[in-house]
Image (spheres, coloured by chain):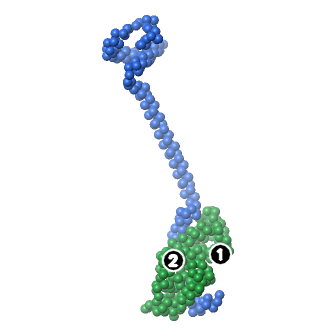
Chain colours: A green, B blue
Amino acid sequence: MKAPPDASDRALARQYLDGSEAAFRLLYRRHTPRMRGVVLRLLGHNAHEVDDVVQESWLRACAALDRFRWESTLCTWLCGIGAHAALEVLRRNERWAGDAALEFVADGAPPPGDGLDVARALDALPPRQRAVMVLHDLEGYTHDEIAALMGIVPGTSKSQLTHARHAMRSALR
Amino acid sequence: MDDDDRLPPELMTPLASLSWESAAPPGEEDRAVRALRRRGLLPAPRWQRYAAYAAGVAAALALFVAGNITGASRARARVEQGDAARAWPAPVSNLRSAELRVQRAGSEYVGALVQFAALARAHPATPGLAAGRESAATTLCAAAVQLPRLSSAVSAEWTPCDDEASAPTRADATIHWF
């Protein structure tokens, strides 16, 4: 079955569910860059699990695609699955505990050379702060949604965001 | 969204400059397709399905041919075994069975000779007539050579006969005449 490149997400999803590999490939090419961007931000650019997480996210999405109700865009839904999978990896690797990592950012003491751009400053945030900031300030999630996604209370999400912003301001000053 | 939620202006510009997208490395798409197939979320490509059907048919054919060959060779072996068993009957362990076998073999020999003689008369020019005659005579000689081995008691009772009328009746005979 040939899938037209300009077909809508919904049409492609239907074709994929009918067994079309071409339709899946089109969806993959269309949405992977955005999903990978989210995963990359959450895991940090040094994380080597990014591509595994993206693949796992696609597998979950494809397994659940027939139950997707199309109340949001497919891209938003896919990015949510990617974010969820990335947070699972962070939790599994116990990187939540790594809040001391690169604390120089939070302390407002950039390393010698001061070459931090905004991406590196974001990567240097402790994982939990980075996750909250990415989800809230970049992806537009509410604190309630973040709390549900990360298994924390909304107040914690707010405080993590405050810390993250403070750290970012310090790093970018 | 309350004031705390609003992105501070000094962070808005830097964060807006971040790239939102990240292209997947080459090969990741194919890896995802393979993973989907492994989990049964995507059917195998058509050529693979055809190859699987062809392999199935080939396997079934191979199984059929192998079964046929095996069956035929077993049947042949069984027939050969049967032929061998008929040619060389198993040795008997008692005198009565040996006596019965002598009777049966004698009857068969005589019956075969009668048939051979009739056919020889009807087709005197048939090749193999001399060989058949020689075979009959050789068998008789071989049997005669074995006779002195019988016990004296049996030898004493044994009387050659010329015709069926002088032979004892079937009811009281211990030896059946041919």
Q: Point out residue B104 in the picture as x, y percentages from the top left corner.
A: 43, 18
The mark lying in front, picked from 1 and 2, is 2
The residue under the point 60% across, 83% down is A154
**Residue closest to the eye, A103 or A56:** A103
Task: Give neighbour class at mark 1: few <14, some 14-19, many 20+ (Cα, 10 Å).
Answer: few
1 and 2 marks on the same chain: yes
Q: Which mark identifies residue A91?
A: 2
Marks 1,2: beta carbons within 8 A: no
Name the chain under label 2.
Answer: A
Residue receiving disc 1:
A73
Q: Residue at x 56, y 77 (%)?
A: A83
What element does badge 2 sit on?
helix
| Placement of the C terminus of chain B among the 4 image quadrants | top left
Q: What's the distance in space between the residues labelled 1 and 2, CA to CA?
A: 27 Å
Residue A15 in view (yes/no): yes
Residue A45 position in % (x across, y down)? 49, 80
Residue B44 point in image, percent of width and height: 56, 60
Q: In which quadrant is the N terminus of chain B drawn?
A: bottom right
Amino acid at dot 1: Thr
Pinpoint residue A104: horizontal percent, then vertical percent. Answer: 46, 89
The tag earlier along the polypeptide, 1 or 2, is 1
Q: Residue at x 62, y 65 (%)?
A: A16
Please tell me which residue lies in front, A50 or B177: B177
Compared to residue A121, the image places residue A72 above or below, namely: above
Kindly identify the amino acid type of the residue bearing the numbered disc 2: Arg
